[in-house]
Structure formats: C-alpha cells, structure tokens
Image (cartoon, rainbow, N blue to C red):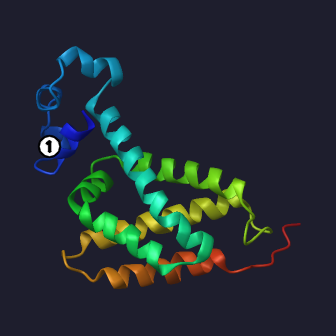
C-alpha cells in the first residue's frame, strides 16, 4: 500500500486520492487497508516515517564525522525523490516527518558522546531537525535544477558546523 500511495502521490494531490485507488493499485481488498490504517493520512504518515529513516541513515555520518559526502548523499536522495518530498512536506506530513526525525535523532545522540555536552541535547536535536527541514523545504520550492552543491554548503555551514562546534555554556 505504501508503494501504491507513493505511485499515486506523485501524480495528484493527496486529497484527490481515494482509498479504493490505493487498494486497487496495491492489489489488496478495501478492508485490508483498514486493518493497518484508519485513514489515508495515517498511511501518508507511515510513508513519511520511512522516508525520514532513509534520510537519517544518509545524514548521520555528516554529524558523526562532519562529512560533506553524506550531506551530498542526503541531497541526492531528496533530489531523486523530489516530487515525493515536496508533496510530503506540503501535504500535511511535515509534522510527522519532523517529529520522527527528532525522535530518532534524540535516540542516536543519547547513544554517542556529544560534541557540546553543555547544551541540552533535546534542544540541539530540535534546532538541527528544524534547520534541516527548513533548508530542504526552501530548496524544494526553488526551480528544479537549483545546484545540489549549494544545498550541501547550506546544510554544512548552517547546521553541521554549528552543531559540531564546541560551545561552552554555563547553564546555571
């Protein structure tokens, strides 16, 4: 059903897609849909979660080692799925995507030493999540063909370098 929704969502807006179309394209019966999802928006949230996990797998090395190659991988992935990402970020799935990204990023940051131990990790995760999604959303509003290298530089300078730099703070 995820694949069917992905196929449909690149051709028309979510509000014009019916559950019957999804089930027909997926080759499952109408009741099967409701065994897994209450609404097509729930299915979209599931797709969004999967996309976020794919994005995190590509972005995590950038924060672990500061590597521009993983940022390029992240941008290439979004570019390859541009229409889907543009749709997800504008069709009401952005909240789920940011929430899932933040949740997983918090788990990751709790498992490894922090660059900025003086900063509250949940604040850093929230800021990084919002910055990444704001940059991606901005990029997807640009004309197709906007240089990916520029987006990589934006992510590196506005997110990775800021996050990776040690900032001593006295929180008391």
Q: Residue 40 vs residue 54: left or right?
A: left
Residue at left offset 18%, top offset 22%: 28
Give the residue pinned by disc 1.
Answer: 8
> Which residue is at the front of the view, 113 or 34?
113
Q: How many numbered circles does the render carry?
A: 1
For the N terminus, the quadrant is top left
Which percent across, then down, holds residue 164? 65, 77
Q: Is residue 33 above or below residue 131?
A: above
Which percent across, then down, holds residue 150? 36, 85
Residue at left offset 30%, top offset 51%: 88
Which picture quadrant has residue 84? bottom left
Under circle 1, the secondary element is helix
Most distant residue in the top direction: 31
Q: Is residue 4 above or below residue 98?
A: above
Q: Residue 99 vs residue 139: left or right?
A: right
Which picture quadrant has residue 87? bottom left
Q: Is residue 93 above or below residue 137?
A: above
For the C terminus, the quadrant is bottom right
Would you call the spot at circle 1 few (<14 residues within 10 Å), some (14-19), or many (20 or more)?
some
> Which residue is at the front of the view, 6 or 12?
6
Residue at left offset 54%, top offset 64%: 60
Which picture quadrant has residue 146? bottom left
Which percent across, then down, holds residue 66? 57, 78
């Amino acid at each position: 059903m995820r694949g069917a929704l992905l196929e449909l969502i690149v051709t028309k807006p979510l509000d014009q897609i019916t559950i019957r179309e999804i089930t027909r394209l997926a080759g499952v019966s109408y009741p099967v849909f409701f065994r897994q999802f209450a609404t097509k928006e729930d299915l979209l949230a599931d797709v969004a979660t999967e996309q976020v996990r794919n994005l995190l797998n590509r972005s995590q090395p950038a924060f672990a080692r500061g590597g521009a190659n993983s940022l390029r991988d992240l941008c290439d992935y979004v570019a390859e799925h541009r229409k889907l990402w543009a749709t997800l970020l504008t069709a009401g799935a952005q909240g789920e995507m940011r929430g899932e990204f933040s949740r997983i990023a918090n788990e990751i940051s709790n498992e490894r030493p922090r660059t900025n131990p003086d900063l509250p990790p949940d604040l850093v995760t929230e800021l990084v999540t919002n910055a990444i999604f704001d940059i991606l959303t901005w990029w997807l509003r640009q004309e197709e063909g906007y240089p990916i290298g520029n987006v990589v530089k934006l992510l590196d300078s506005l997110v990775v370098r800021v996050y990776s730099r040690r900032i001593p703070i006295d929180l008391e």
